[in-house]
Amino acid sequence: MSTTQSLIGALVAAVLLAALHLAAPHVRRLPFVPERATASFAGGLAVAYVFLHLLPEIAEGNEAVGEVLAEQLEPTPLTDLGIFLVALAGFAAFYGLQRLADRRAPAPSRTAVPVGGGGAGEAAAAGSEPEPPGVYWLHLGSFMVYNGLITYTMALRLRTGIAFAVLFTIAMGLHFVLTDRSLEEHYPRRFARSGRLLLAGALLAGWLLDVFFAPTSTVVVALLTALLGGSILLNVFKEELPATGRSSYRWFLAGLVLYAGLLTLVTAAGD
């Protein structure tokens, strides 16, 4: 796939992801399908992606970083951990932001929206305490960077493997269904007014950044993937696994098995 073709493909993926961001509340509340079913199915897809594609991808990137470091430093067990430290930093950064949001969010906004309920409007009506703007913009800004990284590296993913890039787009798109629910509950007023539009815009901004400043170094791409990977790990497990009363194991397992099967088929076809 040529550079131009990959950029066009990445734009299509960015537009689809942006549309899914805007439609996330409707996807979670599909007619005749409980919200916990759609969220759990999306969670299963994302978890399968993490274990069968993301972690091996980070490990592969570690080899590229190790080769570069070997030219400057003598290889040691510590240098072999370099990219995993970046992934850990991404995990820790998003965890810290989530803890900050949990502590600073007003009590009514922490109240879970009833399954199949009306969403941000009902949550906002639960109380009148204002949402802290500083925490909101910090939290939303981190997700905007997160979204930008997804589309900034999308063209490169398409050049290295179209099937894997398509599966990555599907996993991330449905993963947005989970993050949308969390942000809506933390900031029912602010997120409904501006959050989804800004997150969708960040996806397109990441693609534009790739058009003018495409990553050329394998090491840079590996480090960005690791940083994004740590963030994805936290967000996937935080949104799906602890939510016992709001999730369906059967739907979670269905998403996991389906996506694992697709990844296995794509991997086998590529060998």
Image: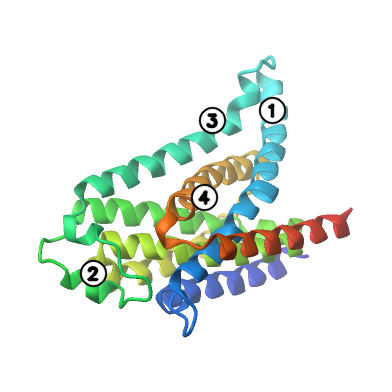
* Measured Cα–Cα span from mark 1 to mark 4: 23 Å
Of the image marks 1 and 4, the number of the one nearer the N terminus: 1
Q: Secondary structure at mark 3?
A: helix
Q: Residue at x 44, y 55 (%)?
A: 244
**Left or right of residue 85, residue 113 in this image:** left
Of the image marks 3 and 4, the number of the one nearer the N terminus: 3
Which residue carries the number 4 mark? 232
**Left or right of residue 158, residue 264 in this image:** right
**Left or right of residue 136, residue 81 in this image:** right
Kind of residue sitting beneath label 4? Ile
14 in relation to 261, above or below:
below
Q: Secondary structure at mark 4?
A: helix
Which residue carries the number 3 mark? 85
Which residue carries the number 1 mark? 66
Which residue carries the number 2 mark? 123
Of the image marks 1 and 3, the number of the one nearer the N terminus: 1
* Measured Cα–Cα span from mark 1 to mark 2: 49 Å
Kind of residue sitting beneath label 1? Gly
